[in-house]
Amino acid sequence: MEDMEKAQKEYEIGVLVRKEEDLAEVRRFLEQHQAVLSADFQAKKIAFAYPIEHQDDGFFAFASFSSDPAGIPQIENDLRTERSVLRSLITIPPKAATGGTAGMGKKRDSAPTRRAAPAASSSAPFVPTLSNEALEKKIEEMLK
């Protein structure tokens, strides 16, 4: 029995079904393949952005479960062929205990630093600014 528990992995499932009652069929598929729900489905009715199989709305539900990794492809196949299931996705949840996420690179300790931009370009000559009086005097000279 311990070997069977060690072979079990945690998964998350997200399904889009036509009616809320269709979640019973998804539960049946999971139980049929010896998957154990650790959290029951949480469903919410949503309107689709575009029709899916001539449906404008449906129920989105997700749950956590544990299963033997060898049974996951068969569960996915059963969900894909079931008419009441519009879409489904099974994922491996990120590991919360280690703080890291599966498949991600090494976590950075701090935010990247930026270098300050140079104050002035070295190719442009320095031109001192003129006061208002000096500017008016310059304009008068140009108009003469």
Image (spheres, rainbow, N blue to C red):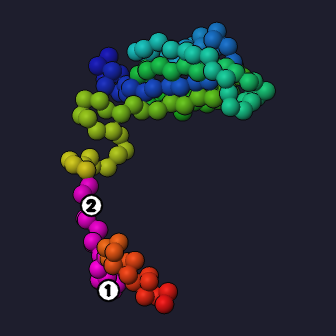
Q: Amino acid at mark 1?
A: Pro
Q: Amino acid at mark 2?
A: Arg
> Which of the marked residues, 2 or 1, is nearer the chain's N terminus?
2
**Residue at point 43% right, 20% down?**
65
Disc 2 to disc 1, C-alpha distance: 27 Å
**Residue at point 67% right, 13% down?**
19
Question: How busy is the neighbourhood of tag 2: few (under 14 within 10 Å), some, or many (20 plus)?
Answer: few
Which quarter of the rendering shows the N terminus?
Answer: top left
Residue 18 appears at what percent x and percent y? 69, 18
As drawn, 118 above or below 51: below
For label 2, the residue is: 114
As drawn, 122 above or below 55: below
For label 1, the residue is: 125
Q: Main secondary structure of the magenta part?
A: loop
- State the residue in front, 141 or 11: 141
The extreme right residue here reads 54
Q: Secondary structure at mark 2?
A: loop
Residue 119 appears at what percent x and percent y? 27, 71
**Residue at point 55% right, 15% down?**
43
**Magenta segment boundaries in residue numbering:** 112-129
Question: How busy is the neighbourhood of tag 1: few (under 14 within 10 Å), some, or many (20 plus)?
Answer: few
